[in-house]
Amino acid sequence: MNKYIVFSDVDGTLLDSKNKILPSTLYSINELKKKGIDFLIVSGRSPNAIYPLIKEYNIKCPLICYGGALILDINNNILYSKVISKDKAKTIIEYINECNFDLTYNIFSYFKRIVPFIDKRVIHEQELVKCIPLVGTIDDIKEEGVHKLLLMCNPNQIDEILISLKNKFEDFNIVKSSNILIEINAFGVDKGIAIKEYCLINNISLDYTIAFGDNYNDIEMLETVKYGFILDNAPSDLKTRDFILTSSNDDDGIYNGLKSLNIIN
């Protein structure tokens, strides 16, 4: 007998507007565990920015990180990885510097986060995800490549920056994930593809998949699964798409979605 599997974004979905997990959400996760239904976190965050969260709430589950570029099993073994080569990442960083965009970039590779300097944006992100970055350059990355470049932008310029980057670098997956964040991954990396990879590795039918998301980097995930729930705190244009609308991240969105499918009581 096939069992459902549930995937959830973190920021704006698993977490409420105070960056906490609601009691109803934690109840839902525990009920899924009791029923033998797997729950996975799917996030643009690095593993090190997810670990403090799952430790705080005693959640043990596989992780899809960096928007789909890295998949870890429940014991943190690497199941899948797709990186941007360091040379290509350097080219993007050089362009960002040449354009003098009002942003701070972050370089992520496996369990490492590097920033060129510490500013108020880095400090804010550090406080949010409880992950301290290293100050350095891409040359400090000794691994074979970069899983993600995260750009923390001036919200008044982010759309202009996004258009410029997309026009310049067509062979990358570049997406706006909030009103201040742009994520850059290798071409062919998104949450939907990662879910397909995870299901293929574990022989899981997509007919039994459920996902929850709230932003543009969740679109492919919600389109891939059988039941894609968009939370009511999502941008208005996403709520008009062919997703299932549930309540907001402050109003029991995950619980209400699972309850509507009779997955939990």
Image (cartoon, rainbow, N blue to C red):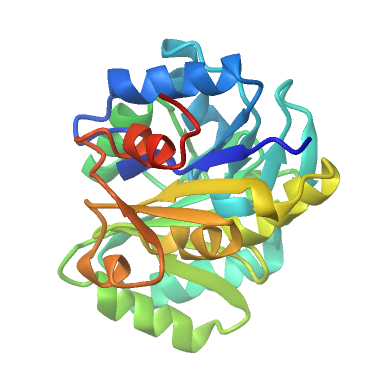
20 and 161: which is toward the camera: 20
Q: Residue at x 28, y 24 (%)?
A: 20
Q: Residue at x 27, y 80 (%)?
A: 160
Q: Quick one: quadrant of the C terminus? A: top left
- Placement of 87 over or under 99, stated as above or below: above
Residue 102 in the image: state x and y as whole percent.
Answer: 25, 65
Q: Residue at x 47, y 31 (%)?
A: 49
Q: Image quarter for residue 171?
A: bottom right
Q: Quick one: quadrant of the N terminus? A: top right
85 and 204: which is toward the camera: 204
Residue 193 in the image: state x and y as whole percent.
Answer: 67, 61
The answer to whether 195 appears left or right of 178 in the picture is right
Residue 240 seen anywhere in this rendered image of the structure: yes
Q: Residue at x 55, y 41 (%)?
A: 7
Residue ranking furthest to the left: 156
- Placement of 43 over or under 182, stated as above or below: above
Q: Image quarter for residue 253?
A: top left
Residue 81 seen anywhere in this rendered image of the structure: no
